[in-house]
Image (cartoon, rainbow, N blue to C red):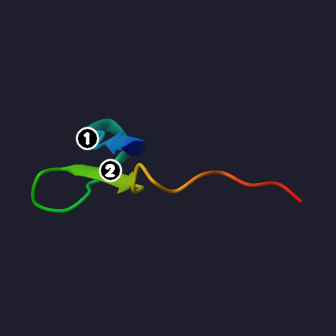
Amino acid sequence: MLLAQFDSAEETDMMWGDVEMLYWLIRPRCSMQCG
């Protein structure tokens, strides 16, 4: 499951890796727990 994704932005000089994208994935079986 995709948690967050950021594209590169040339006007702000932010470049992420070869595909110009930074992303975080989590396993579907993980759950958010509080407390």
Taking the spot 39% from the left edge, 56% from the top edge, the residue there is 27
Q: In the rendering, which numbered label is found on residue 25? A: none
Q: Is the residue under label 1 in contact with that under label 2 (CB below 8 Å)?
A: yes
Q: Secondary structure at mark 2?
A: loop
Q: Residues within 10 Å of mark 2 (few under 14, many from 20)?
A: few
Taking the spot 32% from the left edge, 50% from the top edge, the residue there is 13
x then y, percent, for residue 22 = 31, 53
* Residue closest to the eye, 23 or 15: 23
**Cα distance between the residues tagged 2 and 1:** 5 Å
* Residue closest to the eye, 1 or 21: 1
Taking the spot 26% from the left edge, 57% from the top edge, the residue there is 16
Q: Residue furthest left?
A: 18
Horizontal side, residue 33 vs residue 21: left or right: right
Horizontal side, residue 18 vs residue 15: left or right: left
Q: Which residue is mark 1?
A: 10
Q: Which residue is mark 2?
A: 13
Residue 31 vertical placement versus 8 (above, below): below
Q: Secondary structure at mark 1?
A: helix
Amino acid bearing label 1: Glu
- Residue 14 visible somewhere in the drawing: no
* Residue closest to the eye, 17 or 9: 17
Q: Residue furthest right?
A: 35
x then y, percent, for residue 30 = 51, 56
- Residue 2 visible somewhere in the drawing: yes
Residue 14 vertical placement versus 17 (above, below): above
Q: The N terminus appears in which quarter of the rendering? A: top left
* Residue closest to the eye, 31 or 13: 31
Residue 1 vertical placement versus 26 (above, below): above
Which image quarter: residue 35?
bottom right
Q: Residues within 10 Å of mark 1 (few under 14, many from 20)?
A: few
x then y, percent, for residue 21 = 24, 48
Amino acid bearing label 2: Asp
